[in-house]
Structure formats: C-alpha cells, structure tokens
Amino acid sequence: MSQDTIVKIQGLGKKFKLYNNPQDRLKEWLSLGFKTKHTEFWALKDISLEVKKGECFGIIGENGAGKSTLLKILTGALWPSTGSIKMEGRVLSLLELGTGFNPELTGKQNVLSSASLLGFPDDYITEEKLNLIQEFADIGEFFDQPIRIYSSGMHVRLAFSMFMFMEPEIFIIDEALSVGDIFFSQKCFKKIHELKNNGVTFIFVSHDLNAVKNLSNRIMLLNHGICTFEGKPEEAVARYHAIRNEKKSLPSKNETNEETQFSNSITALEEALPHSVLNGKDRHGNGEMKIIAARVTNKEGDNTLSASMMDELKFHLYFKAYKKIKDPNFGIIIHDKLGNLVFSCNTQNLRASIPDMEAEEERRVAFNLKMTIGPGEYTFALVCGQSTEDLDLNRGITCDRHNSLGPLIVLFDYSKAVPLFYGIAQLPMEIMDA
Amino acid sequence: MFALYLCSGFLAWSAAIECATNGANAFTQNAIYLKKLPIPEQVFVAKEAATGTYSLIISFILLIIVSMFFSHSPSWVWLLLPLPLILFQCFSFGLGMFLGVLNVFFRDVGHSLPIVFQVWFWSTPIVYPLTILPDFMQSLVVLNPAYPFISAVREIFLYHRFPASDIWIAMISWSLLLPLVAYLILRRLRPEIRDCL
C-alpha cells in the first residue's frame, strides 16, 4: 500500500443467497452441505479500486447496480463474500445519518450520544464543536428541545451538521446531499469543498449526477455489479447515459421491421438509430406519420442528454409519412421532475411552414434549444402532427407522440459561481437604469 | 416456607427466560443498527442480559428483605448467592444468542418460544419439589440444564448449604459451553445475518 493510498479494495465480490422459502435453508443446513437449495445472486463482482488521501471518489450506476451494497461493505455493515478491503483512518458514513437519534433527548444530547455510538471518545465533542454544529444546523432554540418535536427537515439538518464536524479521515456519503433547501445544500457543498481541501477523503454515491460530477476527481460506473468504467467524471457520466439509452432504445419486434424496412435514403438515419432516444414505452397518435428516430446532440455534435445551463442542445427528428400530410407540425414538450409543464413549442408556434409530406416520404427536422432553464432533471416528449381543417389554430391532430423521454439533465456548478438566474426558467431581463 | 421456595426458584427462572427471549429478538429488533453500523452483533444480546441481571439483583435483595419477615435467618453462605445467579444469566445469554441467530433466518422461532418455554417451565421443579415426580422422571432431570442453577440457588438461600460438587460442575459447564457454541455459530453465520435482516 503506497503512502497516500487510504482505501484499497481488491477483487471485492458480494454474493447473496436467495432461498424460495425459509424451509429450504433449514434443509440445506441439515444436509450439512450436500444439497444446495439456494440460487446465488452476485450484487458485486470483482471490484478493485484505490482511493488516495484527499481524493473525491464518486460511484454512479442505475438502480440495483450495487452502489449501496458497495458502500455498506465499505462501512462495515455488510461483509464481502470475496476479496479484501483496507481502509486507514476513521470512516464515517452518512448512511448512518440519524440512526442513533433518540426522540426523547434534545438535539444537543443526541449529538453527544450518537457520537459515542459511532465510536468517538466521550470528550470528542467539545463545547466549541457543539456551537459550530448548532450554528451550521441553523435550528435556533430547537437545539435544546427534544427532537421528537422537530420537523423532518430539522432532523436531517441536525444529523448532517453533526457529521460535518466529526472530522473523519474518510467520509462516505449516500444520496444525502439533497438535504434541506438550496441554501442549506449550498452550505453543505461549501463545507465539503473545505473538508476536501483539508485532506478529507470522500466516497460518494448519488443519483444527482450534477453533484457527483462537480465534486469527484474520479468516478466509477457500476452496471449490474460490475465496474464498467473508472476515470474522468465527464466520461463516466457520458457512459452512464449511454447505458441508460442503450436499454431504452431496444425496439419492440414490430418496430424493428418497420425500421429496417426504412430505406436508406437519409444517410444520417443509419447513424442516428443506435443513438435514438425514443423508447416506445409511452406513445400515442393516429400513425399517419411516425417519428422513427430522434437524437440529441450538443454543440460539438456528440450524442448526449445532458447540458450545462445556458448551453444549446440540438434535437434531430427523423420521421416518415404514411399518408399525404398537409401542413405537418413538429414539436417538443419539456416537463420537470414534478410533472410541471416547463416548455412546449412546435414549428407552427414558430410560424414556420414545413412543406407538405407525400405518402411514404421520409424527412428530417432539427431544432436548436438553448437550455435557459434551471438545473435539474427533465423529461421531454416529441410530437408530430397535422393542423386541422377547422379554424382553431390551437388544435391539431396528433400523428405520433413519444412521451417520457430522457431524462434530460441540465447541470450547473453552484460552488464555482452565481448562476445567471434562479428558478424554473430565464425571462429576458434588461437593466435600464443603473 | 413454600413461598420462599417458590419465589427463589421462580425469580431466577424468570430472569433467565426473559434474558433468553429478549436475546432471541435482539437482532431482529435492532436491525436498523445492524444494517448500518459495524457493531458486533453479540452486543445487543449482552445488553439484554445486562438489564436482566440488573433487575434480578434488585428482586433478590427484595426477596432477602421479605424473607426476614418470614423469620428466615440470614447466613454467611448467602454471600455465594450471586454465583449461581450470574452463571444462570451467562447460560441464558448463550441461549439467547443461539436463538437470536436462528430467529434471523427463521422468524417463527421468536413466536414459538413462549410455548416452548412454558413447557420447559412446568417440566422443571419450580412450583413443585423434585420428590413428587415419579422415579424415572427424577432421573431425567439431570438432562434439564435449568435444574442445577435453580437447585443451587435453593441450597444456598433456603437451606444455607454449599451446593454439591456435581451441581457446580453442571452449572459451570452449561454456562461456558452454551455461550461458546452460540458464539461459534454466530461467527460462522455473521455475514449472512446482516444480509437477511
């Protein structure tokens, strides 16, 4: 183990035994190892990694990829089936956030008691430290009240603040960064950066790719318990999306026929199909015209679904008409995490007229969208339609609509600068008198 | 005199059984800690044994005070009284740990314990003297691990006698053997316990 390596994992694997019912386990025990009644499930396989002192190591992967199992093994809450772990120094894990809290004790007493539960010596929390924790948690007089009367936000803030001042050598964080309001999480990020500069090592897992990417020096990508990539954060995030989209773009059988029959008249389509963001899961329309493939690229022309705030994304739609379509219309609809409509616009809204489509005609439309929306995860829908004969311009016929595509991720690094705006979206704002 | 006979046996028995029952549920009840913290499992069983022993000591002090009113005379032999009681608690600590491990994998164990313990209670001479049992059952009582502890408590407390050496041997071997075996089983199954909680 070299001087500055603080965590070293070699060939780590975790096997879970799955039994159909508890009796099977008993039968297996009684047979003294002659019968096996369980099926094996490997949550992690052959994971090796080294983390250096002061480094920030991120772990990302889809649900069920084995991230939490890995963190639990690192904390010592689960035992590995194969391989070895070496850690130097005190490890503190946010998995333990608030586990030792007793509702009858006050905030202050809880800080003291859970510190000793976590194995810190009794005199570790000094008066000075208590003041810092109280100040950071920002819960005022409630610090001296029993925590059963706390709101859930106060509860988490207290726990988080306490952890921030425990000064471990290795800090393990699991999905806990989405704590409190934006000001509190900014404060946490600032504190994490400060600790990082003081040489504290971080290992963390989060679905908040924005946070992981900002904080980590290195990211490991887990897929079904196997480490598929380890290295630069940007590349890891890109590969993560690649895995997700790979899964989603697997076309159903009917679709495959349709798509292979599609003539190669548009050369770019061949290129676009493997990167198509369509998933065909939530789709409706009369089918007179269909969106066959769609891809999203950034300024550099790379396929991606994430963009920094204020950057442009280009949406390419490949579609085919099965009937003559008069005044075809194409649009995009963006919803936020909570399902609020953030933005919806189509070619008709933009007063653009697209030439009529003949039956069996294939064509491509692309539009640029500047992501002047707040950081976060969004889903989007792609629509093609046709305007109706009646006079109401706001109505139309939907030919094909793909819902719940994405997620589209808008990133912003809060720790580095002030964003250009706060909120859902940017409104044009000018300073007239200054 | 029967009141003292009953109480001395019953107090020791109920403390031990409480310790075993709570120990059997210790892992499942503390699953939130075991799933998140690297705390050694046996700590939770030991905690149950410690609280049980604490209340056992208090109830025996009360019993001694009450016995004065029954004009039961004190004796120097009473200084030996903590020994069988603590050995009995060690035995039930081991039993609790063993049952606790089983209970993680077979949750029915915890539920069926009250019935099993009830049968055990009535087959041990606690509310009745050993002599009323038929001969063949009297010879079987050697196999009952609870009997040496209870008879030792009675010898010391009621009759002011030093228990016979075979009783000491039985007590010491039970109270060493069971925790040891339970610990070996726990150590063997430790990784799986946390997976199953």
Image (cartoon, helix red, strand yellow):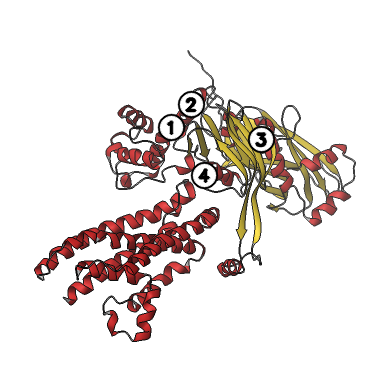
Of the image marks 4 and 1, the number of the one nearer the N terminus: 4
Of the image marks 3 and 2, the number of the one nearer the N terminus: 2
Question: Is label 2 on the same chain as label 4?
Answer: yes
Q: Residue at x 39, y 36 (%)?
A: A120
Residue hosting label 1? A164
Q: CA distance from mark 4 to mark 3?
A: 28 Å
Foreground label between 3 and 1: 1
Q: Amino acid at mark 2?
A: Leu
Q: Is residue A429 above or below residue A252?
A: above
Question: Is label 1 on the same chain as label 2?
Answer: yes
Q: Amino acid at mark 3?
A: Val
Q: Amino acid at mark 4?
A: Gly
Chain letter for mark 2: A
Judging depth in this view, the residue of B14 and A356 nearest the camera is: B14
Please provide percent x and percent y for residue A432: 51, 16
Relative to A189, B128 lies left or right:
left
Quadrant location of the N terminus of chain A in the rendered image: top right
Relative to A360, A340 lies left or right:
left
Category of crowding for the residue at label 1, using alpha-carbon neighbours closer than 10 angstroms: few (below 14), some (14–19), many (at least 20): many
Category of crowding for the residue at label 4, using alpha-carbon neighbours closer than 10 angstroms: few (below 14), some (14–19), many (at least 20): some
Residue hosting label 2? A195
Q: Are marks 2 and 4 in contact (CB under 8 Å)?
A: no
